[in-house]
Image: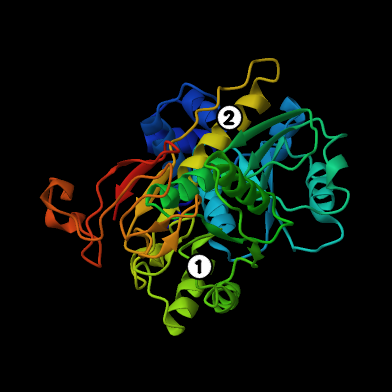
């Protein structure tokens, strides 16, 4: 959008110029620019649009001296193109626009000796009012990272074990995601579920592994050895080469979609059909997940909503230091069932040692048939069928996850 010269004096635009262009009072401009609450979304947007058109910039230094705040929020994130962390960062950048705060981002590299502690110290030196830590990983010394910090923290992802003045969290708990995925495969009748884990320095990867393990234990199922990848499709492919040799393998939960896609490629190359021989589930619902062959069953993570909700509660903690935190709403787990999962093949051995016919549930599971009869076909448009033609009824898994088809 082209910027207009300041009106009135021909110098830099002033708040009164913004007020005139937006058709509001100068007091409303001040309230918007200072991030005060109880300004309607329409008025806020009109003021911000007018400020952008005029090239108006609030004097942040003067405001910081007057209020004792810099109106800035620091973000510690990995400098990575991985879908989850990148999506959270973009969500934060979109959500912050209507808060009156600016983001100061510190990208850290996995394995950096300074870790989270160094990034937090850098942001504290800049005088930020709050700090977001997105998808933290375990670095030496991080347990003491926030002890001296007197600003609120928002943790997006599995929280690291450190203390701070005030900590709020946002997002789906990784443990719940893993329980939903593992429960879905057990509901289909698989005797057990193998796990391709993410790198164990990531707290989220640890939590997904523990959720898988707890679900198997709750159902009395055998816990197979874990293979650890690095989140990449290449590591999933390497794991698939190893797992393809296990003729008893019928189901795999990969800790993210990229690894699941690589895993499927290796299984297919070695004559293991998906899902007829082996069912595979990923996690994240990356954009390509619906278009690979077969389309991938996964869990959809609401990254934008997570960032928006988390930032709202962090700003509340900054501006209301003595108030109770905004209650955490536990979002539903959205399991997206596609064509990469199905019942185990005939001949699979149940937890109790019985040989299963295809479509027969193992103990505690839900029986499913390879070809649905009329009662299995859900009402609705024809595109409720998966790409393989297998129709999946919506509902909930035994773990309580909301199940949808795509």
Which label belongs to residue 218? Answer: none
Q: Which residue lies under the disc numbered 1?
A: 248
Name the spot of residue 39 as percent of width and height, x first: 45, 25
Name the spot of residue 109 as percent of width and height, x first: 75, 63
Name the spot of residue 209 as percent of width and height, x first: 63, 51
The picture quadrant where one finds residue 337 is bottom left
Name the spot of residue 330 as percent of width and height, x first: 50, 31
Q: Is residue 229 left or right of residue 26?
A: right
Q: In the rendered view, would you say 215 is above or below 327?
A: below
Which label belongs to residue 313? Answer: 2
Q: In the rendered view, would you say 14 is above or below 66?
A: below
Q: Is residue 288 left or right of residue 245?
A: left
Q: In the rendered view, would you say 118 is above or below 82?
A: above
Question: In the rendered structure, which disc, 1 or 2, sits on the residue that comes first in sequence?
Answer: 1
**For the point 70% across and 15% down, which residue is it?**
322
Q: Is residue 13 left or right of residue 325?
A: left
Q: Can you tell which of label 1 and label 2 is closer to the viewer?
A: 1
Q: CA distance from mark 1 to mark 2?
A: 47 Å
Residue 228 can be seen, yes or no: yes
The picture quadrant where one finds residue 63 is top right
Neighbour class for label 2 at 10 Å: few (<14), some, many (≥20)? many
């Amino acid at each position: 959008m082209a910027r207009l010269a300041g009106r009135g004096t021909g110098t830099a635009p002033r708040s009164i110029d913004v007020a005139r262009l937006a058709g509001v009072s100068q007091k409303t401009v001040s309230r918007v620019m200072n991030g005060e609450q109880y300004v309607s979304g329409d008025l806020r947007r009109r003021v911000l649009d007018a400020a952008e058109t005029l090239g108006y910039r609030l004097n942040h230094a003067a405001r910081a001296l007057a209020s004792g705040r810099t109106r800035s929020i620091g973000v510690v994130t990995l400098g990575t193109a991985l879908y989850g962390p990148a999506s959270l960062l973009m969500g934060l950048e979109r959500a912050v626009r209507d808060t009156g705060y600016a983001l100061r981002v510190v990208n850290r590299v996995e394995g950096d000796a300074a870790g989270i502690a160094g990034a937090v110290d850098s942001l504290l030196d800049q005088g930020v009012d709050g700090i977001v830590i997105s998808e933290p990983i375990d670095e030496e010394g991080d347990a003491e990272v926030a002890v001296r910090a007197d600003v609120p923290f928002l943790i997006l992802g599995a929280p690291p074990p450190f203390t701070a003045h005030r900590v709020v969290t946002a997002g789906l708990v990784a443990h719940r995601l893993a329980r939903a995925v593992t429960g879905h495969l057990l509901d289909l009748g698989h005797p057990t579920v193998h796990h391709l884990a993410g790198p164990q320095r990531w707290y989220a990867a640890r939590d997904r592994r523990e959720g898988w393990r707890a679900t198997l234990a709750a159902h009395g199922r055998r816990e197979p050895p874990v293979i650890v990848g690095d989140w990449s499709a290449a590591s999933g492919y390497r794991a698939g080469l190893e797992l393809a040799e296990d003729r008893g393998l019928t189901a795999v939960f990969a800790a993210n979609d990229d690894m699941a896609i690589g895993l499927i490629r290796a299984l297919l190359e070695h004559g293991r059909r998906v899902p007829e021989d082996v069912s595979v589930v990923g996690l994240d619902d990356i954009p390509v997940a619906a278009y690979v062959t077969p389309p991938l069953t996964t869990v959809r993570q609401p990254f934008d909503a997570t960032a928006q909700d988390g930032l709202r509660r962090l700003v509340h903690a900054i501006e209301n230091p003595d108030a109770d935190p905004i209650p955490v709403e536990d979002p539903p787990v959205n399991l997206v069932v596609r064509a990469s999962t199905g019942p185990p093949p005939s001949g699979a051995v149940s937890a109790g040692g019985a040989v299963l016919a295809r479509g027969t549930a193992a103990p505690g599971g839900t029986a499913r048939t390879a070809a649905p009869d009329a009662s299995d076909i859900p009402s609705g448009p024809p595109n409720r069928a998966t790409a393989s033609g297998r129709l999946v009824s919506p509902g909930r898994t035994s773990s309580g996850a909301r199940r949808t088809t795509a």
